[in-house]
Amino acid sequence: MFTNRLHWTLTILLLVAVIGLILKSLSPPKEINSIGREEIHLMVSEAIENRARQEARDAYQKIEREYALAEEETLSVLQYGDGSARINMQMFSDIECPICRKMHPVLKQIVDSSQGVINWEYRHFPLAQHNPAAAVESQAIECIRESYGNRNAWVMLEVLFNKTLSNGKGVDSLPAIARSYGMSGSLIENCLASDGHKEKINSDYELGRGLGINATPAIRITDRKTNKTILVRGYKTPEQLLLVISELLK
């Protein structure tokens, strides 16, 4: 009897407490009444911005997990996959090039499925008709590689391929994009203003020109064991590229 009475008493007290919390949540705090429309608008705007930043960072982290084969350290060149892999795919690419954007996941798929036999080296080849956007985007990637490491540079490379309007139209603001993904917008802005990586980009470009490349995408595939190379131009499917690699290995 006593146990039943105690049970009902506790149940009633719990219900009263829950109802009290509900009523309290429905009643606006007194402070809200004293807040003006501008303050409320500012609060809502900040909440929306915070949500957008969090969503951007979540999206960035998702891409970062997909690029697990890219070393995190800062390397002298953008490299995806095992640096000692027998087959090296040296891709000359332009972020403003629509076909390069289409080829980007193809090379990633090949490296991901190669079990360490193939790696991918990204070389900048901004085309004149796509400048200044293409050259500036290449410089931004090098700024990120230098300050945030190889893997973050690969992640931002994919982000820019997805965000650019292509064919020289570029993106709205590289510092703003970097900031939305948790990087320092001012660092990217200052790095772009310094022209510190133009020599690296020009070096990649001249390397490609020396190979007879005048358009993107172009991929020099090398068997490091035999030093045999094949230059592939234009869009290729994964099957076509693997066929070229198999010919190289014969």
Image: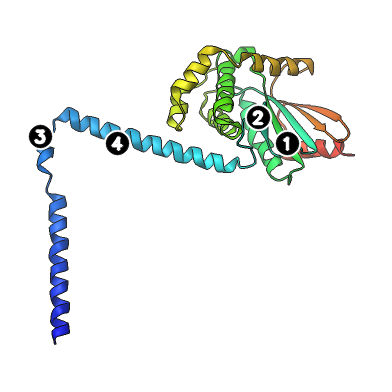
Q: CA distance from mark 2 to mark 1?
A: 10 Å
**Where does residue 210 sit, x and y in percent of width and height?**
78, 15
Q: Earlier in the sequence, mark 2 or mark 1?
A: 2
Visible residue check, residue 172: no
**Where does residue 177 sit, x and y in percent of width and height?**
46, 27
Q: Earlier in the sequence, mark 4 or mark 2?
A: 4
User: Splitting the image into 4 quarters, where does residue 63 fall?
Assistant: top right
Q: CA distance from mark 4 to mark 1?
A: 43 Å
- Give residue 83's mark: 1
> Neighbour class for label 4 at 10 Å: few (<14), some, many (≥20)?
few
Q: Earlier in the sequence, mark 4 or mark 3?
A: 3
Amino acid type of the residue tagged 3 in the rendering = Ser
Q: Nearer the viewer, residue 147 or 119?
A: 147
Residue receiving disc 4:
47
Left or right: 187, with 105 as reference point: left
Q: CA distance from mark 4 to mark 2?
A: 38 Å
Pointers 2 and 1 in contact (CB under 8 A)?
yes
